[in-house]
Amino acid sequence: MGRGTRSVSASQPLRQLAKRIEARTARVAVIGLGYVGLPLAVEFAKEGFRVTGIDLDPARVSGVNRARSYILDVPSGDLQSLRRAHRLRATSSFDVLGAQDAVLVADAGVELHPHPH
C-alpha cells in the first residue's frame, strides 16, 4: 500500500500510432476472412480505416475484391460501398504486412473438413 502510481510515458512511435488511430489513418490488416475476419474487417473499414484482408482462399479474396459477400451477416452492399471508398481490399499475399499499423488474426478455430489421422 504506500506505493504511488507512476506515469509511464509512451514512446514516440506509440504516440504516432495513437494519433493515426484517432484520425482513422492507421492501416489495418485482418488475417483470415471467414465468419470472424470478414465482419471484423468490414467494421474497421466502416469506421474509416483502410483495411487489407488476407486469406489463402482465392474465392474469399475474389469475393471481397468483387464486392460479393459469402457471409450472411455481411451484405454485399456494404462491401460495394467500402470497395468504392477504397477502404477494403483483399489479398492472399502476406507481403503487405510490413506496411500495416495493426495486424489482427481472426481464426475461429473451426475446421470444417477434419483430416483423418
Image (cartoon, grey):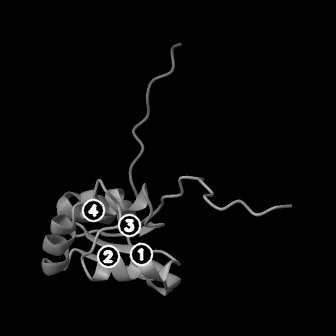
- Pointer 3: residues within 10 angstroms few (<14), some, or many (20+)? few
Q: In what element is the residue under mark 3?
A: helix
Label 1 – label 4 distance at C-alpha = 14 Å
In the rendered structure, the answer to whether residue 100 lies left or right of residue 43 reads right
Label 2: how many Cα within 10 Å (few below 14, some 14–19, many 20+): many
Lateral position of residue 62 relative to residue 48, left or right = right
Q: Which residue is mark 1?
A: 60
83 sits left or right of 55 in the view:
left
Residues at marks 3 and 2 touching, judged by CB atoms closer than 8 Å: no
Asked which secondary structure carries label 1, the reply is helix
Q: Of residues 4 and 58, which is closer to you in this image?
A: 58
Q: Residue at x 29, y 68 (%)?
A: 69
Q: Residue furthest top?
A: 1
The reply to whether the C-beta atoms of the residues labelled 1 and 3 are less than 8 Å apart is no
Earlier in the chain: of badge 4 and badge 3, it is: 3
- Spatial CA distance of label 1 from label 3 is 34 Å
Helix, strand, or loop for circle 2? helix
Residue beneath disc 3: 13
Q: Is residue 82 above or below residue 65?
A: above
